[in-house]
Image (spheres, rainbow, N blue to C red):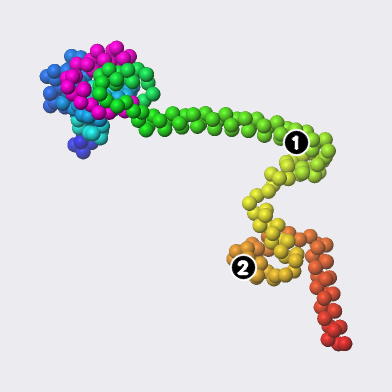
Amino acid sequence: MGRSHGIDGDYLGQVYKDHLSDYEHWEQKSHAKEWILIAKNMGMHLSIDECMYCGRLYTFVSNKDAHGGRGTIIAIIAGVRAETVLRWLLELPRELREGVLDVSMDFSDSMKLIAETAFPNARISLDRFHVFQDLSRHFMKSFSDIRDRILVEIKHEKAAFEKKVEKLGSPLYMRDEDGNVLMYKYELIVSHTARRSALTNLYKTGMFDNREMMAISGHKSERVFEKYIKVGVSEQADRIYNKLKVLKGEKNKKVG
């Protein structure tokens, strides 16, 4: 509203509080920083939880039937100690407190004592948010422990493998001209490696021509497709020789 009228929002809020609202004449103003009770918002289905507000921890009692809208807040009390909260919460009318059917809360023993004392006829239950939050916390801890253990095992296995292949001079390494290890050959493997190997092996069988293999691989361009065929000079020479040999044999059959 302040933005639409060209007025600073903080200033507008302060003006509303000091002059337009009934804050100055509010009957709970004198103790609002310590506790607030709104008995008219009482219902049969409540929730109780703690929340940090302005650097201070407060206990909130809410009417779940209001779904977070007007009429939700029943009590806001500074602190979470059972004796401190109950001192003010028991000021709510007894008949309203006894009419509460259920109260949802977190895993706090203090909150359980507060709920059982202030709402003696209510069924106490753990709300789903805190149940899933606790499950998620334990799951993430287990996941982190397993992950760390696996990473340590992989590190040890890799170190042992590197020591072994260095000693044996394994061809698993790609080396420079001086014989220095550059990287493992398996680090050169990418998603296209298997595709390239499959097409090369298919090409060597001689069963299909390029167009047929492109239909199998899904290539649209023959220029790109040819990059996937890795055949050495000697292998190419052997293929040409074998084809010429076949052609020569067929020609001799026709002459005979």
- Residue depicted at 73% across the width and 41% down the height: 183
**Mark 1: few/some/many CA within 10 Å (<14, 14-19, 20+):** few
- Rendering quarter of residue 21: top left
Residue 102 shows in the view? yes
Residue type pointed to by label 2: Ala
Q: Quadrant of the N terminus?
A: top left
Q: Which residue is mark 2?
A: 215
Near-viewer residue (216 or 46):
46
The foreground one among 194 and 233 is: 194
Q: Is residue 128 above or below residue 23?
A: below
The magenta segment is 76-105
Q: Secondary structure at mark 2?
A: helix
Residue at image mark 1 = 161
- How many neighbours does mark 2 have within 10 angstroms: few (below 14), some (14-19), or many (20 or more)? few
Determine the secondary structure under disc 1: helix
Task: Name the kind of residue labelled 1 in the image.
Answer: Phe
Q: Quadrant of residue 126?
A: top left
Residue drawn at 37 percent across, 32 percent down: 129
